[in-house]
Image (cartoon, helix red, strand yellow):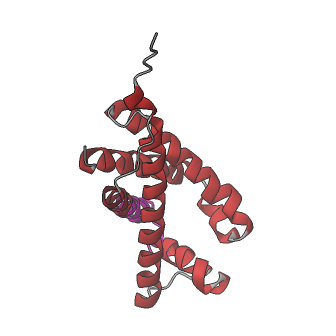
Amino acid sequence: MELHLGSHHWEARMPDWPAAAVSGFVAGATLMVLELLWAATGGQNPWIVSHKIAGIILGSDVAQSADFSIGVVALALAIHYVLGIVFGCILAVIISTSHFEDSLGMVLTIGALFGMVLYVFSFYMMTRAYPWFVDMRGLETFIGHVIFGMVAGFIYWKMKRQ
């Protein structure tokens, strides 16, 4: 007697790395646009977030300032995109190994959950090393990270090779 467990669902699947990188890049850009929109509509200085992100490399002095600096903005963009790509690749691994990558609904759900975990990691755990991110905790940032995960999941789902 032979037992068939739907072996195609049990085999290890490798992510589509180019699709994963693009999905993280696009999701990172989406999050940056949301951050800028929320800052602009909330009457905040739009360069605060750039300074906080650049502070990961340049230190707390830069993270505490908010004046426009092309160097700070360029570094923040580079850091944000690299992190987006890394997190997009991590999400692609989760999606491809979850065996739900054929279901858009499940991919969006996994992406949203990933965004929630990413928010907690970034704004509660990483604040031990980068305390200037504590004041960014809040509903807008949380929603932005959920959207990041969903966008990354959706783009990966659309682009991945069959």
Residue at 33% from the left image edge and 31% from the top image edge:
103
Residue at 39% from the left image edge and 38% from the top image edge:
108
Whether residue 160 is visible, yes or no, is yes
User: In the rendered structure, does residue 54 fall within the stretch colored magenta?
Assistant: no
Q: Nearer the viewer, residue 98 or 40?
A: 98
Residue at 63% from the left image edge and 51% from the top image edge:
120
Q: Nearer the viewer, residue 10 or 145?
A: 10
Residue at the extreme top:
1
Q: Nearer the viewer, residue 120 or 15?
A: 15
Whether residue 111 is visible, yes or no, is no
Question: On the rendered structure, is 133 left or right of 100?
Answer: right
Magenta highlight: main SS: helix
User: In the rendered structure, does residue 37 fall within the stretch colored magenta?
Assistant: yes
Q: Is residue 56 above or below residue 89?
A: below
What is the tally of numbered marks visible in this picture? 0
- Residue bounds of the magenta highlight: 28-47
Give percent across and percent down for residue 7: 41, 27
Residue at 47% from the left image edge and 41% from the top image edge:
97
Find residue 132 and report its image quarter.
Answer: bottom right
Give percent across and percent down for residue 35: 43, 62
Question: On the rendered structure, is 16 left or right of 118?
Answer: left
Residue at the extreme right:
128
